[in-house]
Image (tube, rainbow, N blue to C red):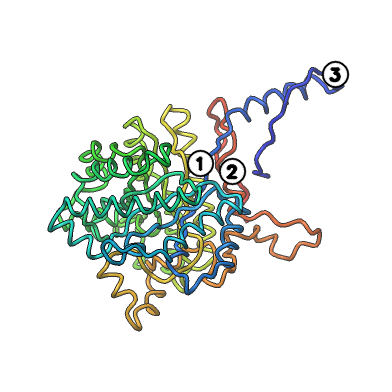
Amino acid sequence: MSIEGRENFSFIPPGETGISNRESAESRREDKESSRSLSMDFFVTDHSLRHPEMVSTGQLREIYREMKRQGISSIRFDWDWDESFPESGKPDRKVLDRYVEAMKMMQEEGLEAPTLVLYTPPEWATKLYEEDKEAYFSAYREYLQTAADSMEVAGLKAHSAQLANEVNHPLLYQFLKMEDFPRVVKTAREVFSRSQPEMKFTASVIVSNFADKIGEVMGKPKTTEFLDQHEKELTAADFTTLDYYPGMWHFPMRFDTEKSAFPIKRSANPIKEAGNVLNRTFKDTEALKAACETVAGWGKPYELGETGFPTNYPYSQGRRQRMFYDMFLRGVRQMMEDFHHRGVALPKRVGIYETQDEPNRGFGIMLDKILNAPGVRQLARLSPFPEGNFGLMTKKGGKQEILRGTLKEREPSTSGVEQISQLKKLISYVNRPFSDERSGKKSDELEMS
């Protein structure tokens, strides 16, 4: 069946239109359902501004244009502290201009105000944090103020800003103590209150049993424990962001059950069976559901900030990535159906990771150096977890399978009408109206081919 968004129907008495009572009743029902239709915004992370040597201005505009065509509402991008202030007190105006021009381009292409990631402190700032915390917050305020002033002069606004990234992850380069996060939020509010008083602030938390297992070895709390322990600090922000990667950072970790991710001893074709288990994992939302219910209970909004799957061969490829989005977003829709009927607050937005493939970066200073060492970058593509190969588009700007039509629609259109991509269909599917009562009919009606 088609999952394209339903139009709003206005009821006109049958006597005025000549339509039957049955048709009128159907129109009223559709109108009532349409009024409950979701308006869940989808945004996407873009790291292109970190790679001006790889992405030209023209290519950047085409990326934004393509995301708009796909039903994406806005961009989440890095207003990097280390890039804009490589030295203390010395902003790099060329970098700042690049950020401003990108925001203008987003606006011109019809995208809504972006989400800024105001993070990635330079090495000199992390040392300052350990040696002189007051000096650190003074430098942090200068960084934020420069960003605020740059946007104000250009007449630009941001939807929100993420002030810390996956604060519970045991492996990422985390220097900020949670006890200081409320001060981070307070500083950001003070800086942006004059030029953008409506701007909202958040921090992200990763929901991941992989991270939980490593954290256990390192003596750090699991995701559920972390949320319970740090509700006060996280709710200093306006909303909470949850990152979730089923099949990547969250996957079956049992070796002795039918749900094992590695059923090598039992299967005649272990590679195929492992792939089947991976596919089933994609629609797993149990851990995400538990985290959502926890943060929903805090009485503040929340969103799904990052989700995605790589295309690095031989571990994966475009078709596997497409299957991930098909299955995961259907799982998210089913989760929202359940929340709707139980009165649990729904996430406000869904974030996709990411616009296009890029060089590996983002794990932390030391690990970044290792990943980008000669020879290692080439080998990284063969590993299961390369952060750089999550793109909806390739490094050269080509579309991955998720941005194309269904498998039956791969031939060039002869009608001149552009084919609707699988991602756009899924976005429409997630936003379809809720029904009044729960029925036996499943929520996964989207035709997959």
* Circle 2 SS class: helix
Task: Give the structural element (helix, strand or loop) at label 3.
Answer: helix
| Tally of numbered tags | 3
Q: Is residue 48 above or below residue 15?
A: below
Expressed as whole percent of the image width and height from the top left, the position of residue 239 reads 36, 39
Task: Find out whether the residues at labels 1 and 2 contact each other: C-beta distance under 8 Å.
Answer: yes
Q: Rounded to the nearest whole Å, what is the CA distance between mark 1 and mark 3?
A: 38 Å
Residue lying at the far left of the rendered structure: 131
**In this figure, which residue is indicated by the disc labeled 2?**
429
The disc labelled 3 sits on which kind of residue? Answer: Glu
Residue 269 visible in the shown view: no
Q: Quadrant of the C terminus?
A: bottom right
Q: Which residue is mark 3?
A: 16
Q: Which residue is mark 1?
A: 333
- Tell me the distance, in whole angstroms, between the alpha carbons under discs 2 and 3: 33 Å
Q: Residues within 10 Å of mark 2 (few under 14, many from 20)?
A: many
Which numbered disc covers residue 349?
Answer: none
